[in-house]
Image (cartoon, helix red, strand yellow):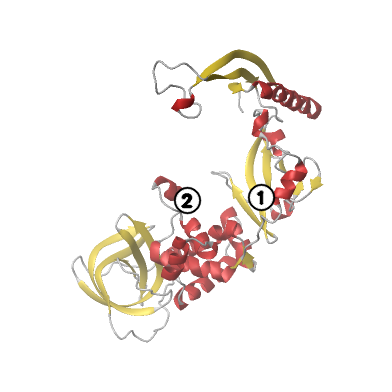
Amino acid sequence: MSDGSRIWYLDEADVAPTIAKLNKLNERARSHGLEGRYTCRLGDVTRQPVYLDGGYDAEAPLDPYAKPDHYKVTQELIVEGVAPKIAGWSFLATLSWDGGVLVTRTVPGFDGRIDPDSVQDQWCDHCRTRRERYDTYLVQAQDGERKQVGSACIKDFLGHAFQPSWVASHGSELDDMEQSFGQRVTEEATVDSVLAWAASLTASHGWVSRDKAEIEYRESSSSVLRGLLFGRSKADREGRQELQPADDHKATAARVRDWARTADVSDSEYLANVQHLAESEYVRPRNAGILGSAVASYHREMNAQAEREARPVSQWAGQPKDKLELDVTVRGDTAIDGDWGVTHLYTLVSDDGNVFKWFSSRNLELAPDQHIRIKGTVKRHEEYREVRQTLLTRCKIAEPQPEPNAQPELEAAS
């Protein structure tokens, strides 16, 4: 709760417990030296007419001349003030451990790295205790100091939201514990399985981020992937039948895992998460989407690498409308999900180092480093990141495919 006021309409029996809860919160703030306090005052008593023949708690009768059957009485309680907290702290990241592997979820705009050696599983720097916790949180002071805190202590840093007494669960702590018995089930999938399903999903539908999914009112790829791996619904079963990973998807998964294990993570918290997960043996549902997104990241990196390597030597080929026959090496396959379905962007490099791009409406299941002979028409010449590229259209793969030649010469032109 931020500065300002909030008004509740409480049953008479809830007024005294709510005020007691507020006083307890203020007492905690005083004992811990927190800034901010709450005050409260009683407002009006409201008697709302209830008409039973209009439905439960109906505000208007079916008969306009009917009299109320009874009244619902509520007491107005006005709460004002500032949420108690330690001044100058802000939220930085959620920390979770998946099978002993640290996975971080940072705030948007976070730039930098979180040192894994600076945090500990289930530990709180504020109360100096270690106990069973699903998550802990990283907060940062204005001077750059960071603390790892638990879910109870984080309120001291970000503010204690105040709710009426009836928001809290009823019953004793033993009742709550007993109700939770048997409800916790740990599910895991192997890293290779997660990446193989992600490779199949990405090849067929592209990878749709959560942000894009929210904008377009659709399901994100991470959610679909969790369903493929752990789901039991009819849609999940049908998805598994449609997207069962083939050998080429498993081969892609192996390449992605090798790439993730050796990637430079010095400037990327995301890649550090991917690397930690790729080095483990199993992944739980919560982090399957993070690992699965590595397939799309891998394809982007392979495309960028091909462009970087070809930058010194790549030249435009032919003229628009010219028909070309080329021996090329596949350097990237990026699935792009658009309004008209999934399009595959193939990045190709010829034996003399020229870069070609080809948008195909079909998934041709071309593997990185595969050598093919294609026939196509020059659509236009482009330059991207100082790399000259020839965009092809109406391409066909010649049969049979040629034997692999020597690797294309990609060294800088003299």
The picture places residue 228, in percent across and down from the top left corner, at 50, 64
In the current view of this chain or complex, which residue is farthest to the left? 321
Foreground pick, 33 / 26: 26
Q: Earlier in the sequence, mark 1 or mark 2?
A: 1
The answer to whether residue 293 shows anywhere in this view is no
The quarter of the picture where residue 404 lies is bottom left
Residue on which the image places disc 2 = 210
Label 1 close to label 2 by CB (< 8 Å):
no
The picture places residue 280, in percent across and down from the top left corner, at 65, 66
The quarter of the picture where residue 387 lies is bottom left
Marks 1/2: CA–CA distance: 19 Å
Residue at left offset 29%, top offset 84% = 399
Residue at left offset 74%, top offset 48% = 177
Q: Amino acid at mark 2?
A: Arg
Whether 380 is drawn above or below 413: the answer is: above
Whether 378 is drawn above or below 401: the answer is: above
Residue at left offset 60%, top offset 49% = 105
Q: Amino acid at mark 1?
A: Leu
The picture places residue 253, in percent across and down from the top left corner, at 51, 71
Residue at left offset 68%, top offset 38% = 169
Residue 95's tag is 1
The quarter of the picture where residue 182 lies is bottom right
Secondary structure, mark 1, is: strand
**In the displayed structure, does residue 394 sit left or right of residue 328?**
left
Residue 167's tag is none
**In the displayed structure, does residue 372 sit left or right of residue 134?**
left
**In the displayed structure, does residue 412 sit left or right of residue 173?**
left
The picture places residue 115, in percent across and down from the top left corner, at 69, 52
